[in-house]
Amino acid sequence: METHAKSIIQISGSRKICFLLVFFVVGLFVFCNLASAEKEVNGRGLAALKPDTAISVEIKSGFERKSWSNLLYPKSVLRFYQHNGFQPVWVDAAKSPKQTWEAMLMLDCVLQFGLSHDDYHPKDLSYDLLHNILEKPLAVNDVEKAKYDITLTDAVIAFMNHLHYGKLNPDFTADKIDNGIEGGFNAGAFLATALPQKDFMKSVISVQPKVKAYADLQYQMHLLEGVYQGDCYDIPDSTVRRIAANMERLRWAGVADSAYIHINIPSYTLKFHQPDTTYEFKVIVGKPAWPTPTLNSAVSYFTTAPEWRVPKKIFETEILPKALKDHEYLERNQISLYDEKGNYISPGMEALEMISNNPGGYTARQSAGCDNSMGLIVFRFPNVYDIYLHDTPEQQLFKVQERDFSHGCIRVEQAEKLAGLILALDGSENLITNVHHAIRQYKTQNFILKKTIPIIVTYLTCEVQNGALVVFKDIYGLDKRLEMALYNIVDPLALVN
């Protein structure tokens, strides 16, 4: 284990038993409520079991009057009710209230998913009112019943969207999700299929990410906000918030494949996950002034002995100033200069001074070779940041624990081994020898994959290793802002604990 990581909490076997007991108690609570409700409904006679069509009328007219102004996902909720003919889902006393109580219990337990109660209409969804609606239906008017039904549907849809996409996803905002994402997850449609299922709660929470890193953090959160609560454990709020923030980040990643490449910036690691095993590599990431961005893409090919097209910002702020001070710098580093039309520029001092007056009109390229800044292999994947994963000639830097040295791109140790593993997964083991030969000969060659491999770059400041929570340095200082947004915290001083 890296010395910069700190172990926080160790999971014991007895805690796992307690965790199972919690779910047993929850199940017992649901069963008792159902039994009590069924007994009282049966006591009222068959007349009370007739469907209350008046609620449907109020639900529909409420949408027409735009009465439901406090909904989080109004368009999604409307589509849901349009699909089911504006029938009530939760408050019809003639129907089994099993799913209703389970929905309420899930909203009670949102802390165990790293979410906040305040985001799911806690003031409008009271248990007292629900008991009256289901057990004393004549005591509550149809408008209140319709409002409760609509509000609970909105809360469950919001909960599912937050579990699947995250609450603060920078790519999928609440408005974008509410308008409908073509080919994407549809919480309203999923809710319609989940309601008839035997295990409604299990169906709903299945929309969460499937990756192991998320499952491990979620289990930790279940322990901290469920099993350990009231059990004489002193758990810092900062630990809970940190886990919640990183669960949120993993929801943004959106990986569903069993084989994928996962680069985590704060831990300086690359994990190549395959169905039966995981390979781990050290990486170098961007320094705080040139941070590596988080992203979701797919590796489509890699190149041996690549030429490096120097990014304009690096050329203007680093390469050109060094060349002006040292007239042998460009030649020593195999860097060539070109104008906008691609014409080669002889790197004399007079030319360099001319270029310095208009650096944006020129580009620099570093030829392939053992000293190339990208090393001997570069792995390509489309992204708006124009970064890539590559080898490096500075192998000694991998011996350093905190490896934030790059200009945003990601350098990987044992890049040749990674290339071989990628080809093997792609069913192209016969090409591995060609890769070795191309590297030894400094030969530029593209190796195009039959099937792209998903790649995610995350910013996770904690993870679970061997049952223990391990914390990494927040090298870009991003945790506090995300924690404040997740928990609706205004005062940063509230994050001290």
Image (cartoon, rainbow, N blue to C red):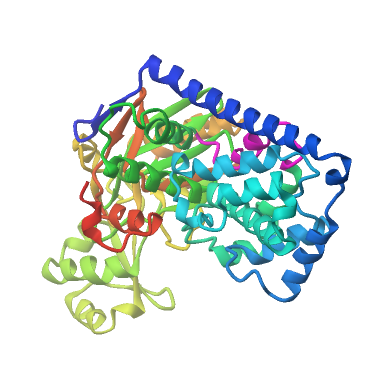
Q: Quadrant of the N terminus?
A: top left
Q: Is residue 427 inside the magenta stretch?
A: no
Q: Where is residue 165 shown, x and y percent of the image?
A: 54, 52
Q: Where is residue 28 shown, x and y percent of the image?
A: 59, 25
Residue found 25% across the figure and 38% down from its top: 395
Residue found 83% across the figure and 54% down from its top: 52
Q: Is residue 219 above or below residue 351?
A: above
Residue found 16% across the figure and 66% down from its top: 322
- 277 on left or right of 472: right
* Count of labels in the image: 0
- 109 on left or right of 474: right
- 245 on left or right of 434: left
Q: Is residue 131 visible?
A: yes
Q: Where is residue 186 shown, x and y percent of the image?
A: 68, 53
Q: Is residue 298 visible?
A: no
**Residue 31 or residue 305, whichever sits in front:** 31
**Residue 483 or residue 430, whichever sits in front:** 483
Is the stretch drawn in magenta largely helix, strand or loop? loop
Residue furthest out toward the left: 325
Q: Is residue 205 inside the magenta stretch?
A: yes
Magenta region:
194-211
Q: Where is residue 375 shown, x and y percent of the image?
A: 33, 45
Residue found 52% across the figure and 51% down from its top: 297
**Residue 410 or residue 18, whichever sits in front:** 18
